Amino acid sequence: MLNVKNHLIILQIVFMEVDKFLEEKRRYITESLIGLRTLEELDDYTLDVGIKKTYLCITVESEQTYETLAKIVEIFIKAYGGTVIIYPKGERVCLELITPKRGL
């Protein structure tokens, strides 16, 4: 029978593995899908990566921001064939990038 301390250790290991997986996915999306050069064009953004959805929110500084968003949408759809939802969030514009289910 596992005691509380052992349960906490197991949970900590699981959380560390999930964090590691999400960080690897974030790095992959940042480097290959969105592109480091594309992100360099953005001044103020947040990128939240989940298992199936990624959220990119950008402060609109100029018309160039919309061109960059369009480029990100195009790259994402070509790479994944996924769904993109674009919506305003206060002063920001957000993309919800939804990857389709794939077999493991």
Image: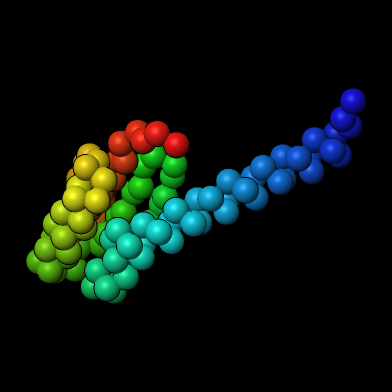
Res 58 seen here: yes
Quadrant in which the N terminus is drawn: top right
Task: Please name the colour scheme applied to the rendered image.
Answer: rainbow
Q: How many marks?
A: 0
Q: Which is nearer the eye, 102 or 98?
A: 102
- Which of the two residues, 48 or 81, is positioned nearer the viewer here? 81
Residue drawn at (62%, 48%), measured in percent from left and top? Answer: 17
Q: Position of residue 81 (x, y in %)?
A: 21, 42
Q: Nearer the viewer, residue 85 or 14?
A: 14
Left or right: residue 51 versus residue 76 is right
Name the residue rendered at 41%, 52% in the picture.
Answer: 48
User: For the view shown, which residue lies furthest in the front direction?
Assistant: 104
Whether residue 7 sits left or right of residue 42 in the image: it is right
Residue 62: give x, y in percent of width and height.
Answer: 13, 69
Quadrant of the frame with the C terminus: top left
Q: Residue furthest top?
A: 1
19 up-or-down from 83: above or below: below
Q: Residue at x 72, y 45 (%)?
A: 12
**Location of residue 60 in the rendering, given as x and y in whole percent from the top left corner:** 20, 63
Q: Quadrant of residue 52?
A: top left
Task: Please state the horizontal and vertical placement of residue 77, each as a whole percent of the image.
Answer: 20, 47
Rendered view: 55 above or below 65: above
Residue at 87% in and 30% down: 2
From where the camera sits, is residue 90 visible?
no
